[in-house]
């Protein structure tokens, strides 16, 4: 692990280095503008990564900025706010200002904080990132623990056949906003995971998310054998053994790393089952220090909470017993943990022979299990009701996901609009419905103009991506035609962006191609659709769905009104959720645990058209978007859902969008946009979510 060398900055603006290494800048519009003002081209060329950017800026540009009174005025303002919003001196619970036994350690296999730190695949990671940001804003005492994937980030290319090809982008640690975590003596920290023989060394990087440190572990170190180096190379390794080794490093290794950093967590929050071996380490430490198994288990259970994200029984990690025995028995024996009692914690009564179930284990070692929406809580109770502890059923509650508003509301125009009409309170009290009621003060015309600008910005971004791709010389002309060059910002635009996998049903809208064609190519009221999303490299069905979209996008009957944009990531997501008119969501119920992209769209004034699944049954009010598919249907519901979807588009969305007064503004549609913002922003903010988790944290810390 090499230490990145900070660039030589003039002293007067030397604080930019600290700013670059704290991802706080990414949700501060003023900090973003400061970086853009320093060198817009370098900001863009660096992929919005200030660490890299500061290395690209020419010394004379830096020298000029250090003498420019206008720049320095902004710099001083940003640095003052940076200090105020990141100084860690007063971390505590708002409702409990006293001392706490130790921070909450939030473990997750992915963290999607910002594109410049690509250690995430999808929604789970984005939620973890939003959780850290909101914990920082709320001053909750939290530390994050995850993995950094040295070959991990998958870039997506669609070839001339419409087939997804992946390239793995190797990690260039020196250009990420991370620095080695250091031990007491100031050396880069390396710890040994106790379960492996020969020992596996783990290096620890630290990212800073506002007030919250995020520790990212890697086994890709010279001290390790090649096979062990590979443990943390890829996110969600396909083979079970690799997966188990990875989860041992994340959970067990993560706890060991925290202790070596002098951090003794007062509670542990497991985001999904992957990091659940953190509880194993805590049991082991406690028993090796002399506690009985029963006492150790009781103490760990009291201070652990678990969030389950998948409504699919098959979606959890189950490790065959021989693998578990090979990797964990030596550790259990050394720590003095009883084998059978430990194995029983991972037993899934619905499938007892299958192996050690990480979700069952996480449920049993936790005081509280949370699902991610009310609907999901019901489904999860159904699936996991057999998992009992001491013969008691384990309660599963819903804490519905929320999004970090300062990250997801488009900063250049829409945040400014909110600043003007809602006042600074929307940043300070993002979960207060009274603040959001002020959205009605925004004149229709102004909201509509801003929205049209965001649509134009999306079209420009899509064009520039297509042009870049064409310029690389490897894409066929046909491929470029599917990349969206014909998008027209004036016409009704639907957005569909998410992981391409069968249950999300990305092709539901294509169920009746002729009906779709009529919808898209109507001469007076045309519609266009922008698709984006990756399939998991091993998910062939998902790749086939991309191919299906690609074929229709290429088909002249649809007149270029279907686009598939490559490389869906957080950056593209920000363009999409603010730059389309309606956000489509068509998963097969009840398989969407929550979903968050529709929340992101709604708060930017892009209403959702969604199946009543995940968060939408809680979010839909009748006038803030459109809903279908709420009824139970036995058997294949594709045709019924597709018909409902077409009907809403034809009879509600299209007429409303094209109903223009003499001022050319669709006032009826704007009313839905405003309702979407007003109703979704407060209730589905990460602030509301983290207040709810905060109560659970207090109880886990023994303070409630
Ligand atoms: C928000 C987001 C997701 C999750 O969206 P869902 O609605 O849960 O599918 C996935 N990927 C990216 C890049 C996102 O920004």
Image (cartoon, rainbow, N blue to C red):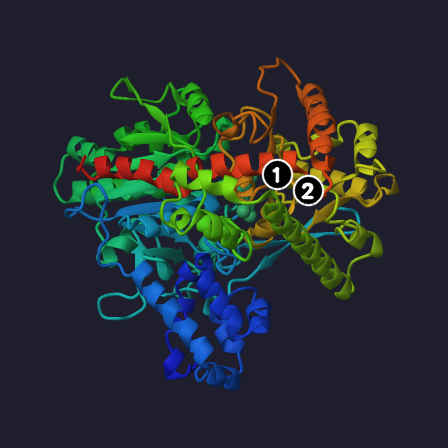
Q: Residue at x 36, y 58 (%)?
A: 210
Q: How many angstroms separate mark 2 from mark 1 (CA)? A: 8 Å
Are dots 2 and 1 in contact, CB under 8 Å? yes
The residue positioned farthest toward the right in the image shown: 556
**Is 358 placed left or right of 42 in the picture?**
left
Direction from residue 140 to residue 683 in the image, left or right: right
Which label belongs to residue 670? 1
Q: Position of residue 142 (x, y in %)?
A: 29, 49
View extreme (top): residue: 634
Task: Give residue 356's quadrant in the image.
Answer: top left
Task: Please give the label number shown on residue 540.
Answer: none
Query: Callout 1 environment at 10 Å: few (<14), some (14 to 19), or many (20+)?
Result: many
The quarter in which the N terminus is drawn is bottom left
Q: Residue at x 67, y 22 (%)?
A: 641
Asked whether the viewer can see residue 215, the reply is yes
Q: Which residue is mark 2?
A: 665
Ligand 1's image quarter is top right
The tag earlier along the polypeptide, 2 or 1, is: 2
- Asked whether, in this view, residue 172 is left or right of residue 136, the answer is right
Label 2 secondary element: loop
Return the residue nearer the eye: 528 or 148. 528
In the picture, measured across the screen, residue 542 lies left or right of residue 253, that is right
Q: Secondary structure at mark 1?
A: helix
- Quadrant of the rendering where the C terminus is positioned: top left
Residue 273 appears anywhere in the view = no
Task: Give the number of marks.
Answer: 2
**Horizontal and vertical percent position of residue 36:** 53, 69
Q: What x and y, as percent, mark residue 647?
A: 72, 24
Q: Is residue 161 above or below residue 206?
A: above
Q: Picture coordinates of residue 96 (x, y %)? A: 19, 42
Taking 667 as reference, is 575 above or below it?
A: below
Q: Where on the picture, by quarter, is residue 268?
A: top left
């Amino acid at each position: 692990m090499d230490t990145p060398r900070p660039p030589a900055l003039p002293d007067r603006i030397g604080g930019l280095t600290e700013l670059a290494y704290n991802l706080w800048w990414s949700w501060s519009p003023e900090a973003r503008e400061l970086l853009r003002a320093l060198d817009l081209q370098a900001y863009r060329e660096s992929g919005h990564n200030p660490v890299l950017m500061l290395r690209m800026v020419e010394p004379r540009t830096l020298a000029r900025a250090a003498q420019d009174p206008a720049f320095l005025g902004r710099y001083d303002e940003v640095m003052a706010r940076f200090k105020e919003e990141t100084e860690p001196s007063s971390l505590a619970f708002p409702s409990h200002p006293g001392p706490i036994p130790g921070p909450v350690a939030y473990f997750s296999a992915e963290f999607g904080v910002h594109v410049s730190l690509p250690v995430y695949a999808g929604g789970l990671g984005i939620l973890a990132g939003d959780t850290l940001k909101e914990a920082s804003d709320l001053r909750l005492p939290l530390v994050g623990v995850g993995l950094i994937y040295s070959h991990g980030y998958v870039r997506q290319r669609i070839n001339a056949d419409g087939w997804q090809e992946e390239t793995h982008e190797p990690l260039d640690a020196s250009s990420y906003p991370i620095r080695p975590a250091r031990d007491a003596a100031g050396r880069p920290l390396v710890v040994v995971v106790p379960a492996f023989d020969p020992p596996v060394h783990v290096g620890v990087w630290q990212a800073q998310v506002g007030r919250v440190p995020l520790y990212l572990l890697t086994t890709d170190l010279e001290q390790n054998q090649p096979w062990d180096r590979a443990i943390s190379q890829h996110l969600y390794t396909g083979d079970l053994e690799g997966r188990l080794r990875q989860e041992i490093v994340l959970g067990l290794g993560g706890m060991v790393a925290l202790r070596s950093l002098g951090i003794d967590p007062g509670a542990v929050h497991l985001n999904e089952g992957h990091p659940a071996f953190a509880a194993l380490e805590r049991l082991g430490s406690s028993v090796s220090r002399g506690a009985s198994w029963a006492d150790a288990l009781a103490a760990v259970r009291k201070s652990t909470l678990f969030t389950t994200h998948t409504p699919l029984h098959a979606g959890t990690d189950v490790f065959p017993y021989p693998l578990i025995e090979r990797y964990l028995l030596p550790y259990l024996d050394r720590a003095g943990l009883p084998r059978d009692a430990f194995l029983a914690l991972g037993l899934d009564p619905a499938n007892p022979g299958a192996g050690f179930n990480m979700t069952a284990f996480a449920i049993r070692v936790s005081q509280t299990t949370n699902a991610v929406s009310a609907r999901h809580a019901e489904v999860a109770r159904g699936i996991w009701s057999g998992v009992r502890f001491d013969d008691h059923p384990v309660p599963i509650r819903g804490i519905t996901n929320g999004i970090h508003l300062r990250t997801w509301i488009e900063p250049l125009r829409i945040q400014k609009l909110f600043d003007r009409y809602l006042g600074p309170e929307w940043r300070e009290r993002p979960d207060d419905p009274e603040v959001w009621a002020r959205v009605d003060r925004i004149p229709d015309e102004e909201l509509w103009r801003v929205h049209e600008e965001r649509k134009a910005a999306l079209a420009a971004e899509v064009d520039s991506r297509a042009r870049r791709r064409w310029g690389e010389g490897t894409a066929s002309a046909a491929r470029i035609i599917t990349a969206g060059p014909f998008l027209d910002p004036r016409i009704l635009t639907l957005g569909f962006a998410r992981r391409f996998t069968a249950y999300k049903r990305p092709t539901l809208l294509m169920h009746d191609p002729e009906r779709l064609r009529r919808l898209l190519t109507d001469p007076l009221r045309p519609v266009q659709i922008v698709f984006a999303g990756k399939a998991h490299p091993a998910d062939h069905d998902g790749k086939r769905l991309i191919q299906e979209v690609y074929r229709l996008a290429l088909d002249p009957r649809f007149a270029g009104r279907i686009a598939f944009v490559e490389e869906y990531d957080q950056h593209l997501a920000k363009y999409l959720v603010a730059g389309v008119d309606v956000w489509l969501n068509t998963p097969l119920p009840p398989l969407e645990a929550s979903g968050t992209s529709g929340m992101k769209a709604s708060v930017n004034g892009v209403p959702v058209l969604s199946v009543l699944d995940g968060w939408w049954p809680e979010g839909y009010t009748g006038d803030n978007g459109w809903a279908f598919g709420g009824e139970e249907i036995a058997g294949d519901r594709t045709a019924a859902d597709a018909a409902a979807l077409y009907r809403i588009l034809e009879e509600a969305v299209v007429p409303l969008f094209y109903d223009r007064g003499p001022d050319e503004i669709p006032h009826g549609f704007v009313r839905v946009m405003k309702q979407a913002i007003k109703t979704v922003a407060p209730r589905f903010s990460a602030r509301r979510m983290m207040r709810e988790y905060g109560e659970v944290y207090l109880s886990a810390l023994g303070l409630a």
